[in-house]
Amino acid sequence: MNNRRLIIVVDFDNDVGRLGNKTPIIGYDAVFKVATEYALTNPQDSDLNVLFTALKLYHDLKKDVSSGDIEVALVAGDSSSSIRASIKVSKEVEDVLEVTKCNEAIVVVDSVEDESVLPIIQSKVKVVGVERVVVEQLRGVEETYVLLGRYLRKVLEERRFSKVFLGLPGFLILTYSILTLMNLSVYATPAISLLLAAFLIFKGFGIDDIVVKWWRLSPITRISLVLSILSIGMTSIIFYMTLLSRGFSSDIQSIAFYIGNTLPYIIISFMPLIVARITLRVIRRSIRVWRDLIMLVIFIVFYNLLSRISEIVAVQKLSDMRQVLSMLAEYRVVSTFFLYIIIIMSVSAILYIIEKRVT
C-alpha cells in the first residue's frame, strides 16, 4: 500500500486567522503564501517558525523517494476558548484528510497547548511523527525584556490570556474598592480570598468548561443553571447569616444548627440541575434516565441523614461527640443509612445490567 503522508501544522489559537485566512489551508503553495504573509506581519512570532519548519520538512521528505506522497496543511483552532479550539481543529483535520486521502500524519507544533490536540489527530489518522519547534533565544537581559514585552502584548491582546491576567485581578480590585466605599474593608480579605479560591477551583476542576457545555445543551439546562446559580448565591448569604447568628461558634450544637438551617437550601440549589437532566432524558427517551433518578434518591437519603442527625443533637442537647455517636447508634441512624446505600447500589447494578443489554 502506497503511504500518503500529511504534514499537519497546528495553530491552536488561530493567529493566522487574524490575517483574514480561512483554514484549513491545504497544499505547499497555499501554506507558503500564508507563511510569507505572516512573516511580513508578525516576523517575530513563534508560529512563523512552525510554518517554515513544516515547509522545510516537506522539502526534505520530497527528496526521499521512500517517503511516498507528501502533502502539507495548516489547521487552526479558536482564540476564545480551548474547547472551541479543539472542536475546530478536529473538524478541520477531518476535512483535510477527506481532501488529501492521506493515511499517515506528521504533526508540527511549538507549544504544550498545541500538543494537546495530538490525541484528537491520533484518533483520526495514524501519527508517525511529531516535530516540536523550539525557538532559540539569547539569554541576555535585553532579550529577556523583549520576550517579556511580547508576552505582555499577548496578555493584553489575546482574550484567553487577558481573562485570567487582567479580568480576575480587575474583579478582585473592584470587590475591594466596593467594600471599602461601603466601610466594610474588614471583610475585603476574606471576600477576595473566597473569590480567588472559587476561581482556582473552577479552573482546576474544569467546572467552567462543564458549565459552558451545560449551558449549550438546551433551553431547559440554561434555565436550570440560572436557577441553581441564584439559589447557590442565596444559600451562601443564608449560611453566612446563620454563622453570624451564633457568633461563628464551632460547638456541636452550633454545627447542628448550621446544618439544620442551611441544608434545605443547599438541596434546593442543586435540584434544578437534577430535574433538568431527568427532563432531558425523558424527552429523548433515554434509558439512562435511571442514573439521574438514582442521583435524586441519593440526595434525598443524604438530606434525611443529615437532617436526622441535626435534629437529634438539637433535641437531646448533646455537647460531646461521644454522646452524638452513642445517640446515633441508639436511634439506628447509621445502620439505616448503610441499608439505604446497599439497596441503592443493588438497584443501580441491576439497572446497569439492563441498560447494557438494551443498548
Image (tube, rainbow, N blue to C red):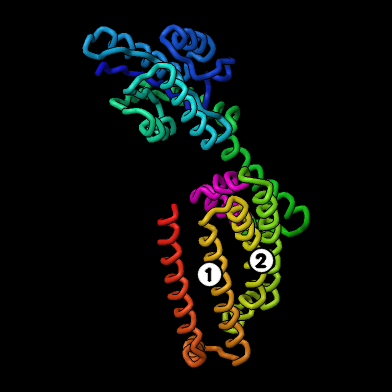
Residue 297 shown in magenta: no
Residue at x 61% of width, y 76% of height:
259
Q: Is residue 115 above or below residue 1?
A: below
User: Which residue in the protein does label 1 denote?
Assistant: 298
Disc number placed over residue 50 in the picture, else none: none
Residue at x 44% of width, y 33% of height:
113
Q: Which residues are magenta?
A: 192-215
Circle 1 — which element? helix
User: Which residue in the protein does label 2 denote?
Assistant: 268
Q: Nearer the viewer, mark 2 or mark 1?
A: 1
Q: Residues within 10 Å of mark 2 (few under 14, many from 20)?
A: some
Where's residue 326, x and y in %? 47, 91
Where's residue 268, x and y in %? 66, 66
Residue at x 30% of width, y 12% of height:
69
Q: Which residue occupies the foreground of this view, 2 or 114?
A: 2
Where's residue 141, x and y in %? 43, 25
Circle 2 — which element? helix
